[in-house]
Image: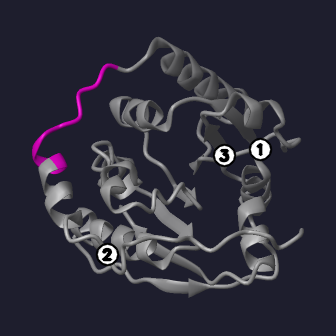
Amino acid sequence: MAGNSRFIASAQAGPHRDVAMLLRRHLAQPFRRPILDFNRAAFATALAARAGWNPQAPLILDAGCGVGWSTQRIAAAFPDHFVVGVDRSVDRIARGKPLPENAVLIRADLVDFWRLLAENGIRLARHYNLYPNPWPKIGHLARRWHGHAVFPVWRELGGELECRSNWRIYIEEMAQALTILAGQPVDVEPYATDDPTTPFEAKYLASGHNLWRCRVALG
């Protein structure tokens, strides 16, 4: 894959000073936005796909899966798990990669999908958040997942969580927020691979970007 990705430019030189304050506010005030019927239907489709393969299979969520390259690879790596790739883009889901029987691609809003998992008492075995939109402007903290009002729901979902980005500040903030959420230290790690999991990962590596990740067991 050609390496033509630009490096992230931001006036923010380090983690945003309001990460902890914003998270504690969200923890104190549950997110109550109504869940759309479209997302309820998409959630039901995902559960039906899992039930049709193995209703007892441990569940993996590939959040923001794009065309499903990562979903495909995760499903191959965990053949006894069922993997749900979720993306809100009609175009990306329509161009979805062929998947093994233990995976499905679903078009839905992750904000609602995460809450529906929690609402139904469903726990994740693994939870991947690979190369989310970094929203690099200083005023965009609340648009980053760790600054969003839905973020506390991640704790209810449990599982082995992994987030990767080519912007170190994003992972530093995510690790800070997860440390509060999980009640245990979460480290920032450099990440390198010869076998990229997503198209973005392949493109960033080909463009000479450094990659970063954080991981935590949420129970």
Which quadrant holds the N terminus? Answer: bottom right
* In the image: residue 150, left or right of residue 126: left
Tell me whether circle 1 and circle 3 mark residues in contact (CB < 8 Å). Answer: no
Residue located beneath label 3 in the image: 83
Disc 2 marks which amino acid?
Pro
Of pointers 1 and 2, the one earlier in the residue sequence: 2
Q: As rendered, which of 135 and 177 lies closer to the eye?
A: 135
CA separation in Å, label 3 and label 2? 32 Å
Q: Secondary structure at mark 2?
A: loop
Q: Secondary structure at mark 3?
A: strand
Tell me whether circle 3 and circle 2 mark residues in contact (CB < 8 Å). Answer: no
Q: Residue at x 70, y 28 (%)?
A: 90
* In the image: residue 39, left or right of residue 169: right
Location of residue 33 with respect to 1 vertically, above or below: above
Residue located beneath label 1 in the image: 67
Q: Residue at x 55, y 16 (%)?
A: 41
Q: Position of residue 167 (x, y in %)?
A: 52, 74
Q: Position of residue 185 (x, y in %)?
A: 29, 80
Q: Secondary structure at mark 1?
A: loop
Specify the quadrant of the image occupied by residue 204.
bottom right
Disc 3 marks which amino acid?
Val
Q: Which residues are magenta?
A: 26-34
Q: Is residue 198 visible?
A: no
Q: Nearer the viewer, mark 1 or mark 2?
A: 2
* In the image: residue 154, left or right of residue 214: left
